[in-house]
Image: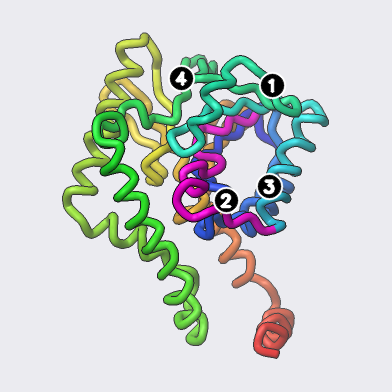
Amino acid sequence: MLYRTLFLSDIHLGTRGCRADLLVPFLRSHEASTIYLVGDIFDGWAISRRGWHWPQTHNNVVQTLLDKARRGTRVVFIPGNHDEIMRNYLGTHFGGIEVMQSADFNGINGKRYLVTHGDQFDAVVMNAKWLAYFGDAAYDFLLWLNPKINRLRSLWGGRYWSLSKWAKQQVKTAVNFIGQYEDVLADEARRGGYDGVICGHIHHANIRQIKDIAYINTGDWVESCTAIVEHPTGKIELIDWEERAAETIQRRPKRKKSKELAQLDS
């Protein structure tokens, strides 16, 4: 697919929770004139706490992005809190990838958007960083437990299920936080004279109108495997790649699907 603009965030390369196995085929099958990497592309917090998990698929993500930049795609990297070390290099280029604090995005629809990771509007990250680290460790535990649950689910043909995503949806305080975060980002965009905001950070993909402001969150590639795209027509769409990949497998001929299952079982 060819798009005008593609927005990705919260990939968390360097962690076991990163779904690089799904991101690589997504990147290879989706071209865009401009790609915005909206923070937490790699996880610098993992270095100080437990060391990186960096399999070949994570290398493939980096190489695919660099290849796109070399072939003329504009790639803009807006660091988040997990890769905040890159905020020391604002205004520089790495392999053709621009590093910026935030960006102005002008859509074909005539609207102007603030593009920011969003952590600077998260009171927990800004004012109680130790609590953010504690929450991150608990989140990692859920991600560690999740594949073990999914291996059991696969025995009965169940599709991938995110324990961490389920937990966040069940906790009232988390739901309240998401709503407050969205409102704060919308207020910031309004103060800046923008028509909307495109962000990440909270791993909750969403497109909704908050009064006069379009709130757009890219989601993540740990729990949801989502991205925001701008079509050549100006339409802005949320893509759930995991859901599309699952539908593609289900539509394959039964004989081929049975053969794949047999190979997995052998």
Report the Cα–Cα distance between label 1 and label 3.
Answer: 18 Å
The mark found on residue 113 in the picture is 4
Q: x, y percentage for residue 62?
A: 70, 43
Q: Give the CA distance from mark 3 to mark 4.
A: 26 Å
Q: Residue at x 58, y 30 (%)?
A: 36
Tell me, for residue 120, which label it has, or none: none
Q: Amino acid at mark 1?
A: His
The reply to whether the C-beta atoms of the residues labelled 1 and 3 are less than 8 Å apart is no
Q: Amino acid at mark 2?
A: Gly
* Residue receiving disc 2: 14
Q: Nearer the viewer, mark 1 or mark 3?
A: 1
Q: Secondary structure at mark 4?
A: strand
Find disc 3 in the rendering and name its residue.
Answer: 61
Mark nearer the N terminus (1 vs 3): 3
Is 125 placed left or right of 40 in the picture? left
Which residue was labeled with disc 1? 93
Question: Which of the two discs, 3 and 4, sits closer to the camera?
Answer: 3
The numbered mark, 1 or 2, whose residue comes first in the sequence reads 2
Residue 207 appears in the figure: yes
**Which residue does the image show at 75% across and 28% down from the upper left?**
95
State which region is magenta: 35-55
Disc on the earlier residue, 3 or 4: 3
Check whether the beta carbons of the residues at disc 1 and disc 4 lie within 8 A of each other.
no
User: Which is in the foreground here, disc 1 or disc 4?
Assistant: 1
Let me know if residue 129 is in the magenta part: no
The image shows residue 216, relative to residue 56, as above or below, that is: above
The alpha-carbon separation of the residues under discs 2 and 3 comes to 11 Å
Residue 78 percent location from the top left of the image: 53, 27
